[in-house]
Amino acid sequence: MSCGDPHETDCSEVLDHLYEFLDHEMPDSDCTKFESHFEECSPCLEKYGLEQAVKKLVKRCCGQDDVPTDLRAKVMGRIDLIRSGQAVPEHDLTASAELPSSAQES
Ligand SMILES: [Zn+2]
């Protein structure tokens, strides 16, 4: 879960509050701590980037803020792949994400 380097903010703390950060539901002082953590910790940054990408994708396609559970599970699978050393480009993730047909532009 950690890149092995010591950080001012613990990785587990960052990941525990990732959604609060994404939703801007935390104080500015905490956001600053998280941002500096992402700068020095690529595993956390990767996870943050994926979550952010999914969130944006879902919002754009479905017009909703909540990420469907199955889609989130799919992304978590991707994250596991990345963790195991198989880097997956972001465009690949978004291209393979199966969204409800009602999400198509009309
Ligand atoms: Zn970290």
Image (tube, helix red, strand yellow):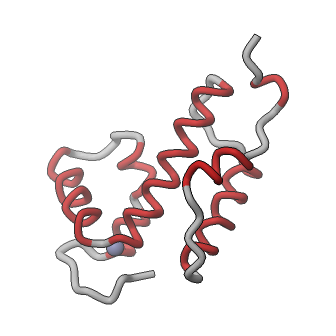
Residue situated in front as seen by the camera: 27 or 49: 49
Q: Which of the 4 quarters of the picture holds residue 58?
A: top right
Q: Is residue 97 above or below residue 34?
A: above
Residue 89 is situated, as x and y percent measured from the top left of the image, at: 56, 58
Q: Which of the 4 quarters of the picture holds residue 98?
A: top right
Q: Residue at x 71, y 43 (%)?
A: 68
| Quarter of the picture holding the N terminus | bottom left
Residue situated in front as seen by the camera: 106 or 27: 106
Residue situated in front as seen by the camera: 38 or 21: 38
| Quarter of the picture holding the C terminus | top right
Residue 3 is situated, as x and y percent measured from the top left of the image, at: 36, 83
Which quadrant does ligand 1 occupy?
A: bottom left
Question: In the orientation shown, which residue stands out farthest toward the right?
Answer: 101
Judged left or right of residue 53, residue 35 is left
Residue 32 is situated, as x and y percent measured from the top left of the image, at: 17, 53
Residue 97 is situated, as x and y percent measured from the top left of the image, at: 72, 46
Q: Residue at x 68, y 26 (%)?
A: 62
Judged left or right of residue 29, residue 48 is right
Q: Residue at x 74, y 49 (%)?
A: 96
Give the total number of marks visible in the rendering: 0
Q: Residue at x 75, y 25 (%)?
A: 103
